[in-house]
Each structure stands twice: as C-alpha cells, then as structure tokens.
Image (spheres, rainbow, N blue to C red):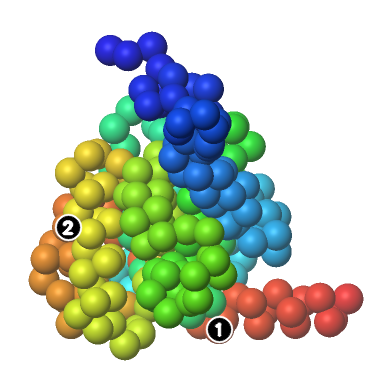
Amino acid sequence: MSEYICNICKDRGVIIQGNTAVPCSCQKKKAIYNCFKNSRLPNALTDNTFNNFNLKYYSKEKHDNIKNVSYLQLAEYAYQASQNFVHKFLNNEEVEGILFTGQIGSGKTFLACCIANYLLNKEKTVLFMVVPDLLDMLRATYTSQKGDITYTEQDLLCTARGVPLLILDDLGVHNYTEWTKNKIYSIINYRLNNNLPTIITTNISLEDLEEYLGERTTSRILQMCKPYRLLVDIDIRFLKRKDILSK
C-alpha cells in the first residue's frame, strides 16, 4: 500500500510541468470535497438534533393501516433507527442506510439532519444534497459558460459516489427524465457496490418509487436502505410556527 494519499504529487499539492510548478489535480478534487463537507448542510438546519426532535407532533390515536401501529410508534421507530445508525457508523461498521418516507412536513428531513449534525460534530464527513439542487448543479456543467463554474460533472458524481456518508434529501415527485434517472442510478449503484451508507428522504411511497425512479434504481435503494415511514395529521412546520406565534 502506498504511503501517499496522492501518488501523482506525493501529497505535495503541486507537480512540475516543464519549469513550472502547477497545482496537482488532487487539489481541485480536495477543494470540491471540502466545500461540500463544510457548506452543503443549510445553516437553518444545523439546530436539527436528536435533542430537539419532538415526538409530541405524532398522534397516539391515528394508526398506519399498513403496519397497524400509531403515528407516534412510527416516529419512535424512525428516531431509534437514526440513533442506532450514528453509533454503528462511528464504530466503523458496515451500516445499512435508511430510507425515510412520508408526506411533506412529517419530519423526514429533520431526522436526516439529526444524523448529519451528530456525525459532523464528531468530525465525520457527511455530504447533504437536496436532490433537485444536485441535478441542477449537474445540468449547469453542460449549459454554463466556460469559467463560470469550477467543477465538472465528473467531479460532482465522484464526490457523491465516494463520500463516506451521503444524505439525499427530497427525492420527491419530480419529472425524472431518463438523464436524471441515470445520474441517480449511477450514484446509488456505486454506493451499494462499495458498501457506502446512504440516507434518503422522499415523499414517494414505497409502492410508487419504481414509477418515478425506474426498477433498477428502486431495487438498489431497497437493497441498501431500510425504510421507515413517518406520518402526521398536519405539517409539523405549520404547527411549530403556530406554537411560536402563540407565545
């Protein structure tokens, strides 16, 4: 095994071309990787922690007809699974990913951010990507003028494929073309084959995933992620805003 992270520049960060020292290609990749690691989780979501996850928004009376358990029990299962995930991840075990499903405002992104914030505080590398934003960034590599952006399509795909923990937020009901399906499949398939855990949130039901993403992507998601469903009577964001205004 090599003692260097980059065998091209031997970790010096530069290579000699003729009589000139130029940045090694690893520096560009490192800059992109660090940018994602440090900035992709929105500031508004940094307070989404396990300590702030409130079960009061989930009904004890309403029941999921499929599993015949209450909305509260569903939330408790998802919460416990999220905590189990971070502890296994910290122990460098091969960790099964999580697929959070449920309607808008049911706490899916909140729990995904609980995982992200916990691990970031432990100095682990996490990439949080809102799926529509990722697809827009990929499209921009085709349509932008030269010099407008500092990354390529391959840079983005390599980062999303290889990051230790990837969180794909809002894999929702969008217009998925064959191009977008192929990009998502490329990321998911690579991570499955290399035992890299992925957290996914979606408002698409398990029964409808294949309709939007295709059979091969859906099959791989269900192979690599254990599904947890979250259900609420009313959008939690609305209830939180109501609580604030009532004070």
Helix, strand or loop status at disc 2: helix
Q: Is residue 90 left or right of 179 when viewed as pictured?
A: right
Give the vertical position of 94 relative to 148 (above or below): above
Query: Can you tell which mark lies on residue 146?
Result: none
Compare residues 202 and 4 and report the one nearer the observer: 4
What is the distance, in whole Å, between disc 2 and disc 1 at their CAs?
Answer: 32 Å
- Residue 73 appears at what percent x and percent y? 42, 60
- The residue at which mark 1 appears reads as 234
- The residue at which mark 2 appears reads as 220
Helix, strand or loop status at disc 1: loop
Question: Tags 2 and 1 in contact by the CB under 8 Å rule?
Answer: no
Identify residue type, mark 2.
Arg
Compare residues 6 and 212 and report the one nearer the observer: 6
Give the vertical position of 14 relative to 236 (above or below): above
Which residue is found at the position 31% from the left and 87% from the top? 175
Q: Is residue 101 left or right of 190 when viewed as pictured?
A: right
Quarter holding the N terminus?
A: top left
**Residue 131 visible in image:** no
**Residue 11 visible in image:** yes
Q: Residue furthest bottom?
A: 175
Identify residue type, mark 1.
Ile
Which residue is found at the position 36% from the left and 23% from the top? 7
Q: Is residue 215 left or right of 161 when viewed as pictured?
A: left
Q: Earlier in the sequence, mark 2 or mark 1?
A: 2
